[in-house]
Structures are given as C-alpha cells and as structure tokens.
C-alpha cells in the first residue's frame, strides 16, 4: 500500500471548517483513501473513504485531487469533540489498514 | 457506539504469563482484525480472521495467536508476556475481508509488569 504524509498537528477554531491534508503521491489505481480518527483512549473511528470522486457523509467531506496524489478531509463546523488524531490511510481492497502517526487536530474555543 | 465489544477493558499481567483478550464483532460482520497500539503510536496490525481462518498476519511473533468462532467473535492470545507487550489492543470488525470500513472496539489496555 502507498505511504501517506500528514502534518504532525493542526489547530482549528471552534465552528470553523477544519481542513486536514494528506499526500499520497505513490497511490495506485486500485487503492482507496480512508480516514479514521482516534479520540484519546478510544478505538479509532471510521470517518469516510473514497477512490476517485469526492465523497460526503454526515461527518465529513473527502476531496481527492484529480491526479489522486493528495486529498483533504473537511470537517465543516469543527467542535471541541472533534479534537483527535486523524489518520489518512491508503489501502487496496483486501489489504490491512496501515496506520501512520496521523495529524493531531486541536479544536479551540 | 460501534457494536464491537472487547473484554476486559483493563488487565495487569506479570512477565512470562499468558493472556487472552476477547472481541465480539458487530452483527453481520464476518471479519475480525486485531491491532496493537503502543503509547504515542498508531495501531499496528497483528492479524485478521475471516470466517474462522487466519487471513493475513503482521510482523508479530508466533506467541501472538488468535481464534475466531462460528459466531465470528474472536480471541487474541499472547504467551510468554514481555514488558514491551504493554499496549492498547484493538479489535476491528468488518462485513468482509476487503474494502469495507472497519469498526473498532474501545480496546483492552494491557499492562505487563
């Protein structure tokens, strides 16, 4: 599976959109982009995933560039409860999830 | 709430002992994966079970073993515990072994002293 690069940490004001970038320049055509988050001392929580098209669900939006070499997870109205470690994972069908260090997102009031 | 439950939530064991951790998968899910998360690091894949068979293994020694039962619940067994085995052990279940999203339990915090 392709490797991903994420910023170590980011801050966001409460109520504002949080935009979390992820680079995956070596992604293959059959690999999906997954996002999970982990709130302190809890298990990781699935957020969203996509292959080529932008995706949106009740939690977030995923924007994937046309060349698929990077993506952005958008939390439209961040709250204090969104403070967590966010993991961007590239994964082919059938492969395991490989977690990196992720991005620590701090939402501040 | 993901519907994936793990037990126990916390456990303290002595070096050299053996431990069994348990996971009940979400209804309708036939695949269970186990991860180890050391403090300050991301989860590391241990192995996956699909329909009671091991279906992939990470870089963990044979003293880490597992089982999956007909109801798709699972156990993780660790023999000859070492201090470095102290970690949060996470179980994740999914509808299949492929690309569908995995849902994680809250984990078991194992401390080896």
Image (cartoon, coloured by chain):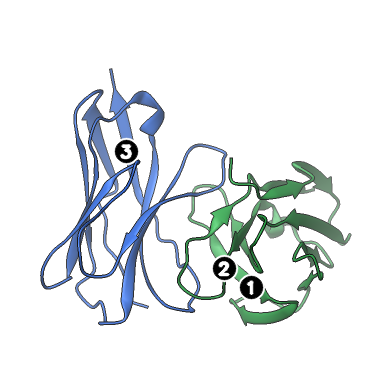
Chain colours: A blue, B green
Name the mark on residue B45.
Answer: 2
| Residue at mark 1 to residue at mark 3: CA–CA distance | 29 Å
Do the numbered discs 1 and 2 sit on residues whose CB atoms are within 8 Å?
yes
Residue A72 % position (x, y): 20, 53
| Residue at mark 1 to residue at mark 2: CA–CA distance | 8 Å
Can residue B110 be seen here? The reply is: no
Q: Chain of mark 2?
A: B
Q: Looking at the rendering, in which quadrant would you find the N terminus of chain B?
A: top right
Label 1 or label 3, whichever lies nearer to me, is: 1
Q: Is residue A80 above or below residue B95?
A: above
How crowded pointer 2 is (Cα within 10 Å; few <14, some 14-19, many 20+) is rated as many
Using the rendered view, name the quadrant where residue B19 is placed. bottom right
Q: Are marks 1 and 2 on the same chain?
A: yes
Return the residue found at the far top.
A109
Position of A50 with respect to A91 (left or right) is left
Using the rendered view, name the quadrant where residue A16 is placed. top left
Name the mark on residue A22.
Answer: none
How crowded pointer 1 is (Cα within 10 Å; few <14, some 14-19, many 20+) is rated as many
Q: Chain of mark 1?
A: B
- Say which element carries label 1: strand
Position of A71 with respect to B50 (left or right) is left
Identify which residue is drawn at 50% across, 75% down: B98
Residue B13 % position (x, y): 84, 50
- Which residue in the structure is indicated by mark 1? B48
- Which residue in the structure is indicated by mark 3? A105
């Amino acid at each position: 599976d392709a490797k991903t690069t994420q910023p170590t940490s980011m801050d966001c004001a409460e109520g504002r959109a949080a935009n979390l970038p992820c680079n995956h320049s070596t992604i293959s055509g059959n690999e999906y982009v997954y996002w999970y988050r982990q709130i302190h001392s809890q298990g990781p929580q699935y957020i969203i995933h996509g292959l080529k098209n932008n995706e949106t669900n009740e939690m977030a939006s995923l924007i994937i560039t046309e060349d698929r070499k990077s993506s952005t997870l958008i939390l439209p109205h961040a709250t204090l409860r969104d403070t967590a470690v966010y993991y961007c994972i590239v994964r082919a069908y059938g492969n395991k999830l490989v977690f990196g260090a992720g991005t620590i997102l701090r939402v501040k009031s | 709430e993901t519907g994936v439950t793990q037990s126990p939530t916390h456990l303290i064991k002595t070096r050299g002992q053996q431990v069994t951790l348990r996971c009940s998968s979400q209804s309708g899910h036939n695949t269970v994966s186990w991860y180890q998360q050391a403090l300050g690091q991301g989860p590391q894949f241990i192995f996956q079970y699909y329909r009671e068979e091991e279906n992939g293994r990470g870089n963990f020694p044979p003293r880490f073993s597992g089982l999956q039962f007909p109801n798709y619940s699972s156990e993780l067994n660790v023999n000859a515990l070492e201090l470095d085995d102290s970690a949060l052990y996470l179980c994740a279940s999914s509808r299949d072994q492929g690309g569908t999203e995995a849902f994680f339990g809250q984990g078991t915090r194992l401390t080896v002293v």
